[in-house]
Image (spheres, rainbow, N blue to C red):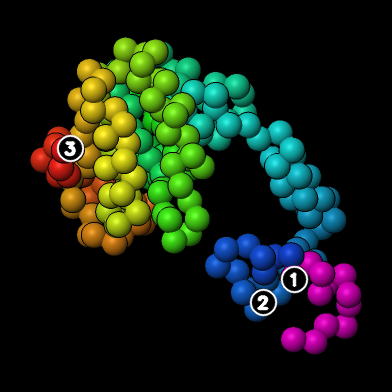
Amino acid sequence: MSFSSSLLEQAVNEFSKLPGIGKKTALRLVLHLIKQPQEETQLFADTIARMRREIKFCSKCCNVSDTEICNICSNISRKKQIICVVENIRDVIAIESTQQFNGLYHVLGGVISPLDGVGPDQLTIEPLISRLKEDEVEELIFALSPNIQGDTTLFYISKKIKDLPVKITTIARGIAFGGELEYADELTLARSLQNRQPVANYVSMK
């Protein structure tokens, strides 16, 4: 791809670093921005820069937040006795879209995947265990994607907390094995939450 402007080329190269954005799509986005009034592109740039500069992670659940404690954890109407464990922030958004869950969350920041060099110490597993010990949590729902990495993570955490007085469940497998939670439709995801099963019925705790 040949460019008549080095500035245009640099912008395209930066946009193409985004997930799912190839050079052609990046070029289309950059050309769109060029056509916009300068104040609009400046607002766009300022918004991205401010987001990256000021974004925080909730000190309780590790979800993204504007403040030290996110608006979900600080919401007094949420059921604080139930925590839903998810892989990433996108999964929180997917579950919230169903409007069928009124508990709290814990974002692991990934799943255990030795082939990708991701071990338990790189996830927020210890903060989760601390929450279970310190707070009056009655149920822990695992809402991890139904694949090998998700099941490995579920099994590992279940073994770590098996002696704690917490009911451990997992979402029903209305989601196909190997699928990604964030891409499940809202109805399927809502039913999976409603029909959750005890983890002991799903994986061996021995």
Q: Name the residue carrying label 2.
A: 23
Q: x%, y% of residue 51?
A: 69, 40
Labels 2 & 1 near each other (Cβ < 8 A): yes
Among numbered discs 2 and 3, the one appearing first in the sequence:
2
Question: Mark 3: which amino acid?
Answer: Met
- Can you identify the residue that label 1 sits on? 12
Residue at image x 32%, y 36%?
A: 157
Name the outermost residue toward the bottom.
2
Q: CA distance from mark 2 to mark 3?
A: 48 Å
> Which mark, by number, is residue 130?
none
Q: Nearer the viewer, residue 5 or 177?
A: 177
Label 1: element kind:
helix
> Which residue is tagged 3?
205
- Residue at the image point whose x is 82% and y is 50% from the top: 42
Specify start and end residues of the magenta stretch as a single range. Answer: 1-13
Q: Quadrant of residue 80?
A: top left
SS label for mark 3: loop
Q: Position of residue 49 (x, y in %)?
A: 76, 44
Q: CA distance from mark 1 to mark 3?
A: 51 Å
